Image (cartoon, rainbow, N blue to C red):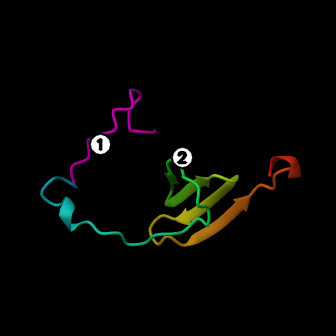
Amino acid sequence: MYRGTYDSWGYSPLDKINASNVKQLFPVWSISTGVVEGHQAPPIVNNGVMFVATPQNQVLALDAKSGDLLWRYVRELPEDLV
């Protein structure tokens, strides 16, 4: 659920990451979507697959653990919208 609760509270009840150990976190992968406009939709993760919707009508499916691109869908827009 976006932001965790129906009232969009945004805080997680999970406690493995806390104020004393958060400094030990580090990124393990990153990806460029190839789109320079701002990405406003949060990614969705289901069964280890991260789905990222981008501006310009793209959806990427990534292996959430490795960051490997599984597939990319690009919807072709009519010429009068491009």
x, y percent for residue 25: 26, 66
Question: Looking at the rendering, which quadrant does residue 75 occupy?
Answer: bottom right
Among numbered discs 2 and 1, the one appearing first in the sequence: 1
Judge the density around disc 1: few (<14), some (14-19), many (≥20) Cα neighbours within 10 Å: few
**Whether residue 28 is situated above or below residue 72 in the rendered picture:** below
The circle drawn on residue 41 is: 2
State yes or no: residue 15 in magenta. yes
Question: Looking at the rendering, which quadrant does residue 8 occupy?
Answer: top left
Whole-angstrom CA distance, mark 2 to mark 1, is: 19 Å
x, y percent for residue 67: 49, 70
x, y percent for residue 21: 16, 61
Which residue, given by chain and number where applicable, does mark 1 sit on? 12
**Whether residue 14 is situated above or below residue 21 in the rendered picture:** above
Pointers 2 and 1 in contact (CB under 8 A)?
Answer: no
Considering the numbered disc 2 on the image, is that residue within a helix, a strand or a loop? loop
Question: Looking at the rendering, which quadrant does residue 65 occupy?
Answer: bottom left
Q: Residue at x 35, y 69 (%)?
A: 27
Magenta range: 1-16
Determine whether, in the image, residue 75 is placed left or right of residue 1.
Answer: right
The circle drawn on residue 77 is: none
Residue farthest toward the top in the current orientation of the protein = 7
- Disc 1 residue type? Ser
Determine whether, in the image, residue 13 is placed left or right of residue 7.
Answer: left
Q: Residue at x 29, y 42 (%)?
A: 12
Q: Nearer the viewer, residue 60 or 33?
A: 33
Considering the numbered disc 1 on the image, is that residue within a helix, a strand or a loop? loop
Judge the density around disc 2: few (<14), some (14-19), many (≥20) Cα neighbours within 10 Å: few
Question: Considering the image in quadrants, where does the N terminus appear?
Answer: top left
- Disc 2 residue type? Ala
Q: Residue at x 29, y 69 (%)?
A: 26
Residue farthest toward the right in the current orientation of the protein = 79
